[in-house]
Amino acid sequence: MAGNFLENNVVVVVGKIFTDLEYSHELYGEEFFNFILEVPRLSETKDYLPVTISNRLFEGMNLQVGTRVKIEGQLRSYNRKSPEEGKNKLILTIFARDMMVLSEDEVVKNPNEIFLDGFICKKPVYRTTPFGREITDLLIAVNRPYNKSDYIPVIAWGRNARFSEKLEIGDRIRLWGRVQSREYQKKLGNGVVTKVAYEVSITRMEVVEKELQKS
């Protein structure tokens, strides 16, 4: 059910620490740090995903750039004002609930998995890529405790793109996929800068019937 906040947003990623841990903030005496995790795809490319972790989770661990870890947590979002653009920007991060160090020879079948149970909160946008692939952009609101929600950009491909194009705001969906990073070019002032976007790429999805949504 969407009310079970620990089960409606589940991420499991395996990869190598790509950047040094950087202090982020303190909350109720608990310190939080950020780093980028390099996660392999089935192809030769990699995703570079932001992670936020409590110091209590890695106490006693020797975490360095290149350390291979498994992280279980949730994909969280928050708004932050962009100094370059002067407006709020949606920031995504994997909020770690558990982490363990893995050896190099430990085989992991799927190093990047996510499950979300949430609601369509923006009209889906269907388009085709320059190579003719069908794609639909979605924004999913996933409930969190204390009347908060995470707003997560999601993309659907092929037949899932055609199916999700017809979804309406307020529809509840469950989806399975992976978290991915994507570079893009943006004009700022007189120049062009390279930025990174994060989103969920769907591999499977289903609509929750309205009768079940009320239960």
Image (tube, helix red, strand yellow):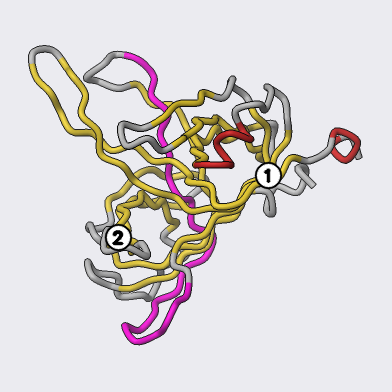
SS for tag 1?
Answer: strand
Label 2: how many residues lie within 10 Å, few (<14), some (14-19) or many (20+)? many
Residue at position x 38%, y 26% from top? 80
Q: Is residue 133 above or below residue 9?
A: above
- Identify the magenta region: 87-109
**In the image, what residue type sits under mark 2?**
Glu
**In the image, what residue type sits under mark 1?**
Asp
Looking at the rendered structure, which numbered label has been put on residue 35? none
SS for tag 2?
Answer: strand
In the image, is 124 to the left or to the right of 23? right
Q: Where residue 156 sits in the image (x, y, percent)?
A: 52, 40
Our reading of the magenta stretch's main secondary structure is strand
The quarter holding residue 121 reads top right
Q: Where residue 31 sits in the image (x, y, percent)?
A: 41, 52
Residue at position x 50%, y 26% from top? 126
Q: Which residue is mark 2?
A: 38
Q: Is residue 35 visible?
A: no
Between 210 and 97, the one lying in front of the other is: 210
Which image quarter holds the C terminus?
top right
Name, please, the residue furthest toward the front. 132
Label 1: how many residues lie within 10 Å, few (<14), some (14-19) or many (20+)? many
Q: Which residue is mark 1?
A: 117
Between 38 and 99, the one lying in front of the other is: 38
Q: Where residue 169 sits in the image (x, y, percent)?
A: 68, 22
Q: Is residue 187 visible?
A: yes
Q: Where residue 183 sits in the image (x, y, percent)?
A: 25, 39
